[in-house]
Image: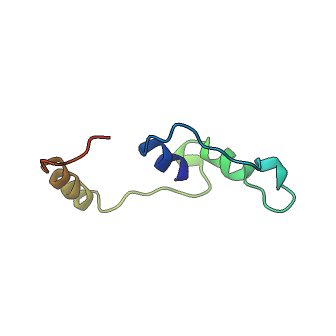
């Protein structure tokens, strides 16, 4: 989610200090990375879409705004 936000905000570069291996003895994020590389059907945390029709209505409203921003 953080990466997506940075991408959409057109952030050129993300700086960070600690890598996953630096704190693996306390908190291991590598499992998250490995899980995200799998197809949706194989991920530990399942993804399910709901209320798509309602969401599409919001996007149609946005698309019709004269002052909308195209990202």
Judge by depth and name the residue closer to the eye, 59 or 10. Answer: 10
In the image, residue 26 lies at what x, y percent? 84, 62
Furthest residue to the top?
12
On screen, residue 66 versus residue 27, left or right, reads left
Residue positioned 55% across, 42% down in the render:
39
Query: How is the protein colored in the picture?
Result: rainbow
In the image, residue 69 lies at what x, y percent? 25, 45
Judge by depth and name the residue closer to the eye, 40 or 66. Answer: 66
Residue positioned 20% across, 48% down in the render:
68
On screen, residue 7 versus residue 20, left or right, reads left
Furthest residue to the right?
25
On screen, residue 39 versus residue 55, left or right, reads right
Judge by depth and name the residue closer to the eye, 59 or 34. Answer: 59
Q: Which quadrant of the figure has residue 38?
A: top right
Task: Look at the image and tell me in which quarter the C terminus lies.
Answer: top left
In the image, residue 10 lies at what x, y percent? 44, 40
On screen, residue 63 versus residue 5, left or right, reads left
In the image, residue 9 lies at what x, y percent? 43, 46
Residue positioned 23% across, 61% down in the render:
54
Count of labels shown? 0
Above-or-below relation of 21 to 49: above
Q: Which quadrant of the figure has residue 45?
A: bottom right
């Amino acid at each position: 989610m953080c990466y997506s936000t940075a991408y959409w905000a057109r952030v050129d570069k993300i700086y960070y200090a600690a890598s996953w291996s630096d704190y693996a003895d306390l908190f291991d994020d590598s499992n998250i990375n490995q899980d995200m590389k799998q197809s949706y059907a194989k991920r530990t945390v399942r993804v399910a879409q709901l209320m798509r029709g309602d969401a599409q209505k919001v996007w149609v409203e946005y698309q019709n705004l004269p002052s909308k921003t195209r990202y």
